[in-house]
Amino acid sequence: AQKVTQAQTEISVVEKEDVTLDCVYETRDTTYYLFWYKQPPSGELVFLIRRNSFDEQNEISGRYSWNFQKSTSSFNFTITASQVVDSAVYFCALRGNNAGNMLTFGGGTRLMVKP
Amino acid sequence: DAGVIQSPRHEVTEMGQEVTLRCKPISGHNSLFWYRQTMMRGLELLIYFNNNVPIDDSGMPEDRFSAKMPNASFSTLKIQPSEPRDSAVYFCASSFGQNTGELFFGEGSRLTVL
């Protein structure tokens, strides 16, 4: 069984603050893939990043960075110098190696960035 | 390029009515997924097609729900008869390849059953 837990249901920050969204996962697969998706107020889900279980290198893309820690089964997402446009619900997701393209999503974290 | 196209964007219907949601995946994608999003249960996978064939429908709530994919460019999700607890946003997503994991989502169909 696979499970993704996003313990923070809602986070509120002031613009320019850094914010970290937590994601903890459970899987019995030795090979797996982790994802983050963004759901802005308009409703569509936007792909942000994919990371496979073999690659524990952290990744940075502009103001976004991801910290993959296999030892703690975590894949946390940090937004540096947050902006109002970052306000959205963020979902962490997991796919096991034998799951085709089926993703198991966490419950999501609603991020509100205030001006 | 056109993304995943879903229709209708919003539907309000009365309990007992039949509801049909439609999805056009991205051209060339060979996997298609139907997800349901509610406040209580979050994002749930209902059914997954690969090359137009249903692979896993274990997430379909009950016999009132059915999904078809008659060709590579069209899928439907039907609820008959609809119930108030079916109210949710239904997302269709598509992807290319078996294992990329990058799903492209439509804008969703918001269903309200009165």
Image (tube, coloured by chain):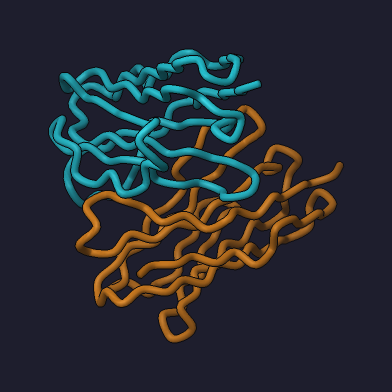
- Residue nearest the observer in this picture, B62 or B21: B62
**Position above or below: B69 against A16:** above
**What residue is shown at x 55% (from left), y 28% (from top)?**
B83
Q: Quadrant of the C terminus of chain A?
A: top right
- Residue nearest the observer in this picture, A12 or A84: A12
- Residue nearest the observer in this picture, B48 or B67: B67
Task: Locate residue B85 relative to residue A49 in the image: left or right.
Answer: right
Residue B46 image-quadrant placement: top left
Q: Quadrant of the N terminus of chain A?
A: bottom left
**What residue is shown at x 33% (from left), y 45% (from top)?**
B102
**x, y percentage for residue B13?**
58, 14
> Number of callouts in the render?
0
Task: Locate residue B67 relative to residue B107 in the image: left or right.
Answer: left
**What residue is shown at x 84% (from left), y 52% (from top)?**
A14
**x, y percentage for residue B105?**
42, 33
Task: Locate residue B27 relative to residue A15 in the image: left or right.
Answer: left
Which chain is displayed in orange in the rendered image? Answer: A
**Position above or below: A72 against A27:** below
**x, y percentage for residue A44?**
53, 31
**x, y percentage for residue B2?**
35, 17
**What residue is shown at x 35% (from left), y 35% (from top)?**
B63
Task: Locate residue A79 relative to residue B51 in the image: left or right.
Answer: right
**Position above or below: B101 against B25:** below
Q: Colour of chain B?
A: cyan
